Amino acid sequence: MGQWPEEIRYIMFIDESGHPSLKAVRRAIQSNKSVDIGEKCLVVTGMVLERPDYPKIRSDVLTIKNNFWPPEGMYFYEKQGENRRVCFHSEDIRKQHGPFKFGTTTAQRTDFLNQISQLMENSQYKVLAAGIDKEKHVKKYKEPTHPYNLCMTFILERFCLYFLYRRRANGIIILESRGKTEDKQVLKHLVTLINSGTNYTKSYVFQRIQGIYFNPKWCFESNCTRSYLGNELADLIAYPIHKYIRDNIKDPAFNIIEKKLDCYPQYLGKGLKIFP
């Protein structure tokens, strides 16, 4: 998607943290072994932006990029062999890969992390998230629903009912592309929701969604001089929530995101759904 359509009030940018597959969990349970911590849970997160708030957050993101990678927020990505717009990616930031190495300049990295924290704290947006404890899911259900589809259902029910239908608004959802096969599977699930609804939410509520888009990390039509900031920020949100559900610890990053969860402070079951 290029420009924000005038008739669209809300966009929800979606990303995930964790592995959606249940294979490793099933193997561990069948072998009477502990489930690897990296396989324990999946979180799907939606960052909900309202149209009037988008220009400010876009400007703030570009300012950070231009300040740390002057003059235009570009960086030479060795793997791709070319200059590209810096793309905020949680794992790269945590592991100090690519543009986030900052060399031996600890002060610069600290300044960058502080500015990202301020961005996430001061920007206007809401968060809808769903987390699946995959071990409990497999043990509880004979034929457990695919975790990614289940998470998507939870957050779309809430997005469509509370942000779109009750406010008589239209919205679109934008996901990061994970590959043609994966995108087709997700699209099939989303189209089914829109056409048929769920046991809890009627189809006409889901039909407030006016479009579904899958974006790569960079816009190739611009020769990668643009990235998709909504999906970048959704990625930054997903990991702290994943870590909280997995470890039951509220770290500084989660403390910032927590206040953005819809219905904060009474967000459990609403802005944050943990299942089962």
Image: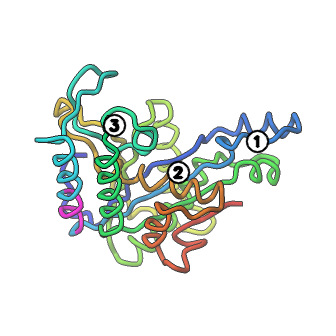
Q: Which image quadrant for residue 24?
A: top right
Q: How many marks?
A: 3
To which residue does mark 2 refer?
A: 192
Q: Is residue 12 above or below residue 95?
A: below
- Residue 199 horizontal/vertical position (percent): 63, 65
The residue located at (77%, 53%) in the rendering is: 136
Q: Secondary structure at mark 2?
A: helix
Q: Label 3 vs label 1: CA separation?
A: 37 Å
| Mark 2 or 3, closer to the camera | 3
From the viewer's perspective, tell me whether residue 145 is left or right of residue 73: right
Q: Quick one: 231 or 149, which is closer to the camera?
A: 231
Q: Is there CB contact under 8 Å for labels 3 and 1?
A: no
Q: Label 2 vs label 1: CA separation?
A: 32 Å
The numbered mark, 2 or 1, whose residue comes first in the sequence reads 1
The amino acid type, in three-letter code, at marker 3 is Thr
The residue located at (65%, 49%) in the rendering is: 41
Q: Main secondary structure of the magenta part?
A: helix
The amino acid type, in three-letter code, at marker 1 is Val
Is 55 contained in the magenta span?
A: yes
The label shown at residue 104 is: 3
Q: Which residues are magenta?
A: 53-58
The residue located at (80%, 52%) in the rendering is: 141
- Residue 125 horizontal/vertical position (percent): 34, 67
To which residue does mark 1 refer?
A: 35
The residue located at (40%, 60%) in the rendering is: 47
From the viewer's perspective, tell me whether residue 35 is left or right of residue 247: right
Q: Secondary structure at mark 3?
A: loop
Q: Quick one: 161 or 27, which is closer to the camera?
A: 27
Q: Is residue 207 above or below residue 216?
A: below
